[in-house]
Image (cartoon, rainbow, N blue to C red):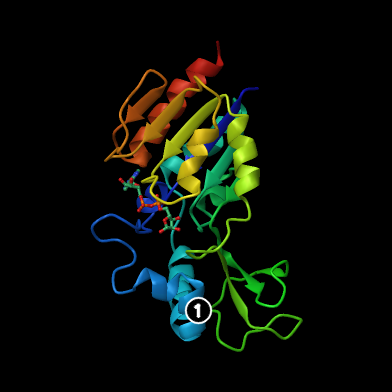
Amino acid sequence: MKNLVVLTGAGISAESGIKTFRDADGLWEGYDVMEVASPQGWKKNKELVLDFYNQRRRQLLKVFPNKAHYALAKLEAHFKVDIITQNIDDLHERAGSSNVTHLHGELLKVRSTFNEKVILDWKDDLKVGDSCEHNSQLRPHIVWFGEMVPMLDVAIEKVSKADILLIIGTSMQVYPAAGLIDFIQANTPIYFVDPKPNVKPSENLKIYAEKAVTGVPKLVKDLEKYSKH
Ligand code: APR
């Protein structure tokens, strides 16, 4: 089976009701990103940061995967699929995808501020005073701006072995995630799904200039035909 790697961003979850970051009504409205998604913000006001993620976690528990998530899960019948997502939601997993790498962490996990390897599943609100077995404050298991991306090497390894690369619903503006495209082998076919694509079509790059809920099922049908050759 060919290796198919999928790089997804906030756009794939838009139709599930989770706002993207850089569209007009971006998620950060009302919040300065550096106040709620940076180590400095955490140091300055833990309650504000915890409240921001508590709101996002409550919302996530009320939304569902959409047709794009489910279509990607179907690809596992035809390809060895690795999903590398910048999203912190669990919608790929809930849609049935079995190999999901979260570059920016996971909203339904928290970790110790004493030992970052102590990671717990967490679906409730997280409050100041909620602590780990070392009695240190728990924090969202999310990569904040300015922090290292621990899964980057894993992602680079997967992209470098891709026979096909799909890029769905990401503005490709945040590094190092956006830099993953530089690690594909020459002539690897790339399929880009975004209603406002900020890339130019080229010989190896095919664009589906539409929302993921319609573009991804179309793309999956095209790829299923391709896999039969
Ligand atoms: N279907 C597909 N794509 C969509 C849809 C949709 N329905 N709606 C919007 N998009 C596209 C937008 O055109 C844009 O290109 O999704 C992309 C969303 O881009 P961003 O909001 O920048 O989100 P993303 O690329 O995931 O941001 C990367 O930045 O803020 C940080 O850590 C955060 O993981 C996030 C990272």
Extreme residue in the right direction: 133
**Disc 1 element:** helix
On the image, which quarter does residue 59 sit in? bottom left
On the image, which quarter does residue 77 sit in? top right
Vertical placement of 222 versus 25: above or below?
above
Q: Position of residue 134 (x, y in %)?
A: 76, 82
Q: Is mark 1 within 8 Å of ligand 1?
A: no
Residue placed most toward the observer, 83 or 197: 197
Q: Which residue is mark 1?
A: 42
Extreme residue in the bottom direction: 129
Q: Position of residue 106 (x, y in %)?
A: 56, 61
Q: Quadrant of the C terminus?
A: top right
* Left or right position of 135 against 130: right
Q: Position of residue 111 (x, y in %)?
A: 65, 71
Residue at figure coordinates x 62%, y 36% from the top left: 158
* Left or right position of 139 against 179: right
Residue at figure coordinates x 51%, y 58% from the top left: 88
Q: Position of residue 51 (x, y in %)?
A: 45, 80
Residue placed most toward the observer, 168 or 13: 168
Q: How many marks?
A: 1
Residue 1 is at least partly visible in this image: yes
Residue at figure coordinates x 30%, y 61% from the top left: 26
Residue 45 is at least partly visible in this image: no
